[in-house]
Amino acid sequence: MRANRLTTYILIAMVLGIAVGHLCHELWPDPGTAKAISDYISLVTDIFLRLIKMIIAPLVFSTLVVGVAHMGDTKAVGRIGAKAMLWFVCASVVSLLLGLVLVNLLQPGADLNLPLPDAAASSGVATSSLSLKDFVAHLVPRSVFEAMAQNEILQIVVFSLFFGVACAALGERARTVVAWTEELSHVILKITGYIMGLAPLAVFASMAAIITTQGLGILVTYGKFVAEFYLGLGILWCVLAAVGFVFFGRRVFELISLVREPFLLAFSTASSEAAYPKMMEQLVRFPVSRRIVSFVLPMGYSFNLDGSMMYCTFATIFIAQAYNIDLSAGQQATMLLLLMLTSKGMAGVPRASLVVIAATLATFNIPEAGLLLIIGIDQFLDMGRSATNVIGNSLATAVVGKWEGEEPAVPETEGDFAPEPRSQTA
């Protein structure tokens, strides 16, 4: 009931935020004044996201170490990791291919009636950080404290895997360390509960700040592109739900119901990180075992960004269409493979999707300034991408648990953690 109330409050906050933002936009039409007001309103959202970022590093570390340590052997870690990566690769291909097919069918940029920017103009989005060499080097942290300070989830995952495997190898000698780390995870989850109480305020401020500066008119100006992209996301949601139905039957709707709160939180704040702690709690209630959730979910945040990957193909072809640049089927296939690789480096990169798109545009000689066509509405699009990532990672974690032979059972107790699912292989 408490979760239902919070979901209702978030929905109400979204509507009120849009209304207040529209009122501010009408009362203070001057862009400078609107920007100043928006900056003050968004302070609430900034504080909320800072609070979330504050707990991400200790939460990922503590839960992942405990999950790996409880597996007991490195073979289990490798097996579960391989199953997770298999799902991530398949989901990536489906997301990228769906975006490519839809943008070619719908042609959102073919009849664009907007003044195109100078092809020599720069979008201001750096592309150098997307090279394969830099990404591979970026996997390993120079310092675990630096990685935690900068919330580099992928680097934290690497260190936590080493730490957890070492604890599992030491067995009884590391029992105290594992027990202390598990208690730490419970403390962090308790803090998470406090922070989540502020979610409706953050959602209200986020929506109000966006509409104050952009106004409702921006949704009309770019209506076709926004509507067709969200149509694509809707189809992707249906595909993910259908795959979930194959694995779980009607129980997939229970999973969708459980993640509706983190879904709305990610959508309204345009941040997948904001939904991470609540996703962990809800997945355990499905239930998926804590060891699977704490291992697969952090990996998903680096390798399974379904909404973001679909956006990369959709937006790249849209920009090409806006410039009347025809890309052959071979070029588009090459683009899909390129995005398949570069999208894996999105985690931890500011405005990650735009960075990936900028790198892809340069590769295919499409004017980089075309990014200016979508930067203005990227916040609205990012809301859908972030929410889709929540659905994709929730399903991925539950499916890996299923592959591990877990038999979901209805939780018998309430609280932060549900009982461990029964194992069919035990």
Image (cartoon, rainbow, N blue to C red):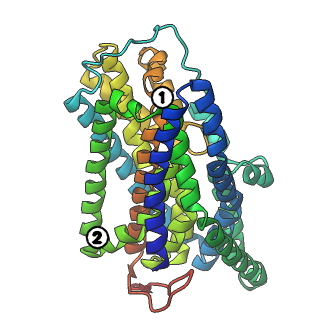
Image vertical order of residue 296 relative to residue 110, above or below = below
Residue 401 placement: quadrant: bottom left
Q: Is residue 234 left or right of residue 164?
A: left
Write the residue at 66% across / 75% down. Answer: 190
Give the Cα distance between marks 1 and 2.
40 Å
Of the residues shown, which amino acid type is indicated by label 2? Phe
Of the residues shown, which amino acid type is indicated by label 1? Gly
Residue annotated with mark 2: 247
Looking at the image, the residue that sits furthest to the bottom is 412
Dot 2 lies on which element? helix
**Image marks 1 and 2: residues in contact by CB distance under 8 Å:** no
Residue 186 in sight in this render: yes
Residue annotated with mark 1: 376
x%, y% of residue 79?
Answer: 48, 67
Counting other residues with Cα less than 10 Å from the Cα at mark 1, is it few (<14), some (14-19), or many (20 or more)?
A: few
Frontmost residue, 185 versus 328: 185
Write the residue at 62% across / 25% down. Answer: 32
Q: Is residue 374 left or right of residue 110?
A: right
Dot 1 lies on which element? loop
x%, y% of residue 405?
Answer: 39, 78
Sequence-wise, which precedes: disc 1 or disc 2?
A: 2
Quadrant in which the N terminus is drawn: bottom left
x%, y% of residue 383?
Answer: 45, 46
Write the residue at 48% across / 65% down. Answer: 9
Quadrant in which the C terminus is drawn: bottom left
